Amino acid sequence: MMIAHAPALFQSASRGVTPPGAERRRHQRVRVQLLGRYMLGDRQEYPCQAIDMSPGGGASLVAAVKGITGDRVVCHLDQIGRIEGVIARLTETGFAIQISVPLVRREKLAEQLTWLANRQALGLLDGRRHIRIVPRLGRTTVTTQDGKTMPVRLLDVSLSGAALQCDTRLAIGATLSIGNTRGRVVRASAGCLGIEFDALLPIDTFDEHIVL
């Protein structure tokens, strides 16, 4: 498989030519799966996941707190580092930011995104679909299909599932409820269970204070 190099992947952006079908964006976007955290004007940190980025144009984030258009954003993303910008528009699951990147940093970002694009082409990206957070209220109860209850500790939670610390080992495929949230066991190891929810959690309640 041919591996793309930074100049080739972003050559249309560097020459100032808008690629066909690029929705008039000035820079080619790369689909990514990068976890991170961001700050708005209140200076509180919130979890996020970048789902696409361009080296000089912007980034789309799945975000727990959306802010408003024009708000300044400081974001730290895994494998990318710090980016800054303003909210350009709100989306159904978060917002898109117009990032402010000096020329030297833009070239480095183009290299990082090329590397990520190549990893994606080779199937080397992390398979997790959604950002994971560690809830502040980690203690909860699981109810199995036959009505038995057991205390568990939430290790982390995503929109689509959770990891639990549990003394009882359940079979893969077993259905259960974590609090009021139904799901099934998809992974099991000594002391830990991986749960996939029957339905995605609502994004507007997804933060460290979440209660399942």
Image (tube, rainbow, N blue to C red):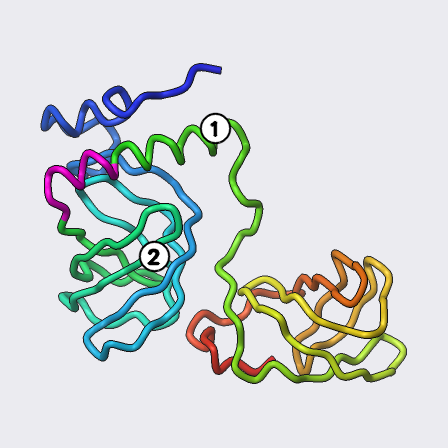
Q: Is residue 93 visible?
A: no
- Name which of mark 1 and mark 2 comes first in the sequence: 2
Crowding around mark 1 (Cα neighbors within 10 Å: few <14, some 14 to 19, many 20+) is: some
For the magenta stretch, what is the residue range? 101-109
Q: Position of residue 50 (x, y in %)?
A: 37, 52
Q: In this image, 55 relative to 159: left or right?
A: left
Place of residue 211 in the rendered image (x, y in percent of width and height, measured from the top left): 56, 83
Is disc 2 surrounded by few (<14), some (14 to 19) or many (20+) residues within 10 Å? many
Pointer 1 residue: 121
Residue 141's image quarter?
bottom right
Residue type, mark 1 in image = Ala
Does the rendering let one see residue 180?
yes
Is 103 in the magenta?
yes
Residue 109 numbered tag: none
Q: Residue at x 58, y 68 (%)?
A: 156
Q: Which mark is residue 61?
A: 2
Residue 112 falls left or right of residue 74: right
Residue 205, image x, y percentages = 46, 77
- The answer to which quarter of the image holds residue 167 is bottom right
Q: CA distance from mark 1 to mark 2?
A: 21 Å
Which residue lies at the image location 53% right of the left edge and 72% below the top edge?
A: 134
| Type of the residue with mark 2 | Leu
* Magenta run includes residue 126: no
- The residue drawn where x is 33% and y is 36% is 113
